[in-house]
Amino acid sequence: MDKVSICMPVYNGGAYFKKALESALAQDYENLEIVVVNDGSTDNGETESIALEYKSRVKYFRQENRGVAGALNTAIRIATGDYFAWLSHDDIHLPNKTSAQIRFLRELGKSDACLFSDYDLIGPSDELIYKAAKDARSLHLKPRTALLNGNINGCTLLIPMWMMRKYGPFDESLRYTQDYDFWNRIVQDHEFFHQPECLVHYRLHPGQDSQKPLAVTEGDALWQRMITGPSETERAQLFGSTRRYFEKMGEFLDNTPYKQAAAVAHAGADDMSRDVLASVIVPFYNEVPLAIRAAKSALDQRDATVELIPVNDGSTEDLTPLRELCNADSRVRLLHQANMGPAAARNAGLLVANGQYIAFLDGDDIFLPTKISRQVGLMQQHGALVSHTSYYISYPESRSGLGIWHSGTFGGCVYPAIIEVCPIAMPTVMLHRSVADEGFVFPTESRIGEDVLAWIDLATRYLVLGIDEPLSIVEWSSSSAALSAEKQTIGLSNLISVLSEHKLHSLQKLQIDGLRGALSRIAKSWAEAGRQFSHDVGDEKYLTDAAWGALGDFSLDANGRVQYFEGKVK
């Protein structure tokens, strides 16, 4: 049975101390020790007298006054338990506090877990003031918000003693915030788990240190350190974006005495609305003039800070014009690799991208001037880590003007529907860098359909923000996957093969059958046309018309001809 040490720092405890000590002695858990440290009390021996009443059941130690941090450091040095618990001299542990937490810890099955529970606020005469029950669902999904939202009461904690010694000692220069300073060190490496059960009565009374003016000054400095500490990725994991992180922290701190920390949070939110770096990755193979056109569309973004990462995928053409563009603009970093396909090229770009947000642009496509600023702004506003937009379509081989594909209406929890119907186009996608930091890469097994596989995998982990605004121009040609029957068959075949073998995706049999149905329809149409099912057969006109006819802004007339409007970029 694990041993628990209840550590009690006491300074002039009075009647509250006796009640607190008796609550520790009344625990229904057997393997327990109580360590009382008298921190230089000046109450004519009253604190010592109370402690000595129970000396056979209490480890008692007296020291010169060093504050709560110093008393806790002494208690931890003396303690012999496997777990640390804290009981202030004016609070109360309910009888099942220790046993309930040990039981919860065993059920959790994590040896490095720190536990905290709900608690009741009581007044000087033990009267109930408020039940401080926390949002269990929110704390389960985002454990770190417990500390950042001030949800952790130190007297509800159960922490492995090895962790107290590893991350200790308490900072004795801090008289009022030594606890949160300590927990903030632990939370960098370990999680605090919420136990949704009231196990402590926390007393409010006029004599508490937390009520003193100097506590506010010290707390203000602590909260400023805490809110600026997490990385870009950690902030996004908590609230979806750094801007939302600072907004939420500002809202929380507005309701506390820590007004300077609140101002720092609000200023951080304002800064993130302006100073955001976006990385744009552009893989290309030959077609240098088109790659330059794409690059310029990324560099000409309005109200946005951009770094451009063109990735040469083993081109055989003269790259001099592109090199000249790169040399003329410090925002551009040209990468080179052997010809391994666009997925490998994008992965190479991901490895060096510095932006808080990452966008992708194919060499033959174009960003509209407000693409980056608009998409980043909406992702920050909604706290989205993955987004895509609607887009314009250019088909210069066959038609003038621009069509629109309203793919941005597709969003939210899109798995598993995305398996059968994935309308996401590469130049419309933007990711928060935390997605890349968590290990996202494009699959490189195939050069056709690899993007769809990537979006499917992302949809299993993230909500997808769909933005029904066209912010890019996707250029079609007769060889584009949207129109090429050959590429469609290769892509569908590849998707079916990979998904059918995947541990999770293979369970989505209805959606995979939908892919098989689409492949069967192509095969049937080819058979009816008397054509071989071969990769080197030319594109069929009827397949081109069918693809255009499926768009929302196009229709077929009675003779099966595509009706088309002349669109302009707004």
Image (tube, rainbow, N blue to C red):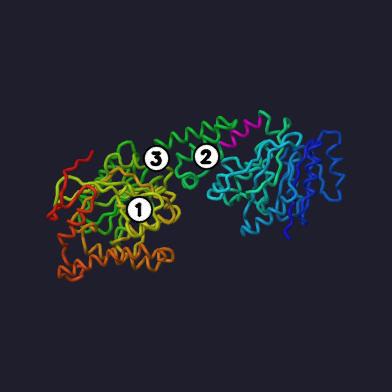
Counting from the top left corner in percent of width and height, residue 107 is at: 63, 59
Counting from the top left corner in percent of width and height, residue 360 is at: 32, 50
Residue located beneath label 2 in the image: 228
Q: Which mark is residue 276?
A: 3
Please check the rendered image and state whether residue 222 is part of the magenta-colored stretch, yes or no: yes
Describe the element under mark 1 as helix, strand or loop.
helix
Counting from the top left corner in percent of width and height, residue 33 is at: 78, 52
The answer to whether 531 is drawn above or below residue 67 in the figure is: below
Residue 344 visible to the viewer: no
Describe the element under mark 2 as helix, strand or loop.
helix
Task: Judge from the rendering whether residue 246 lies leftward or rightward of residue 423; answer left or right.
Answer: right
| Label located before the other in sequence (2 or 3) | 2
* Residue 508 found in image quarter: bottom left
What's the CA distance linking mark 2 and mark 1?
28 Å
| Label located before the other in sequence (1 or 3) | 3
Residue under the image location 63 percent in, 41 percent down:
180
Residue located beneath label 1 in the image: 349
Per the rendered image, the range of residues in magenta is 214-223
Q: Residue 546 carries which label?
A: none
* Residue 49 found in image quarter: top right
Badge 3 density bin: few <14, some 14–19, many ≥20, Cα 10 Å: some
Q: What residue type is disc 1 on?
A: Gly
Closer to viewer: mark 1 or mark 3: 3
What's the CA distance linking mark 1 and mark 3?
18 Å
Counting from the top left corner in percent of width and height, residue 483 is at: 21, 58
What's the CA distance linking mark 2 and mark 3?
16 Å
- Residue nearer the viewer, 42 or 507: 507
Residue 525 visible to the viewer: yes
Describe the element under mark 3 as helix, strand or loop.
loop
Task: Judge from the rendering whether residue 335 lies leftward or rightward of residue 268; answer left or right.
Answer: left
Q: What residue type is disc 3 on?
A: Val
